[in-house]
Amino acid sequence: MSNDPYGASPGREQERYDPANPGPPIPADFEVADRTPPAVKKVDFTRAAAVWTSVIVGLLILIVLLIFIAQNTESAEFAFLGWHWNLPLGVAILLAAVCGGLIASLAGAARLFQLRRAAKKNYKAAMR
């Protein structure tokens, strides 16, 4: 009996030695598998990344709005339902945009409430 643990023994196929890969010899009938490294996992877009992206975009929009207001300081007269007032033109346009955004968000919130209510009703009906 030989002291070589990888040596040929009765009932065992002849093994071959691979000098490029030191270690135990590779069996003769061994198929070399594809040894490509595993793919690097893509980093998912997280909520924290979304928050930071939103903050940066919001700050850029605020900078643009500040420049707009600073360049449109000429005062303008406005009238609405008997009220009369003077405002700088940039502030008036910004105020109109904010009011439009509030109206749009109220309409969106009403639609979300409507859809949530319908989904809740459908869920309860399905559970019966």
Image: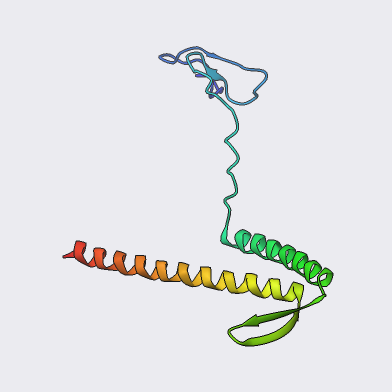
Quadrant location of residue 71? bottom right
Residue drawn at x 30%, y 64% is: 119
Q: Is residue 42 above or below residue 90?
A: above
Q: Nearer the viewer, residue 31 or 121?
A: 121
Q: Position of residue 95 (x, y in %)?
A: 66, 75
Considering depth in this image, is 18 or 107 the residue closer to the camera? 107
Residue 68 image offset from top left, x and y in percent: 78, 67
Image coords of residue 3 (percent x, y): 56, 23
Q: Nearer the viewer, residue 90 or 14?
A: 90
Judged from this view, the residue extending furthest toward the left is 128
Residue at coordinates 50% horizontally, 12% vertically from top-left?
14
107 shown above or below 42: below
Vertical position of residue 48 compared to residue 91: above or below? above
Farthest front residue?
82
In percent of width and height, residue 25 lies at 57, 20
Q: Quadrant of the C terminus?
A: bottom left
Q: Residue at x 50, y 15 (%)?
A: 8
Q: How many marks?
A: 0
Quarter location, residue 16:
top right
Q: Which residue shows up at 25% across the image and 68% down it? A: 121
In the picture provided, is 49 more to the left or to the right than 104? Answer: right
Instruction: Pick whichever, 105 or 19, lies toward us.
Output: 105
Is 124 placed left or right of 99 in the picture? left
Within the image, what quadrant is residue 81 found in?
bottom right
The image's colouring method is rainbow
Is 106 placed left or right of 69 in the picture? Answer: left
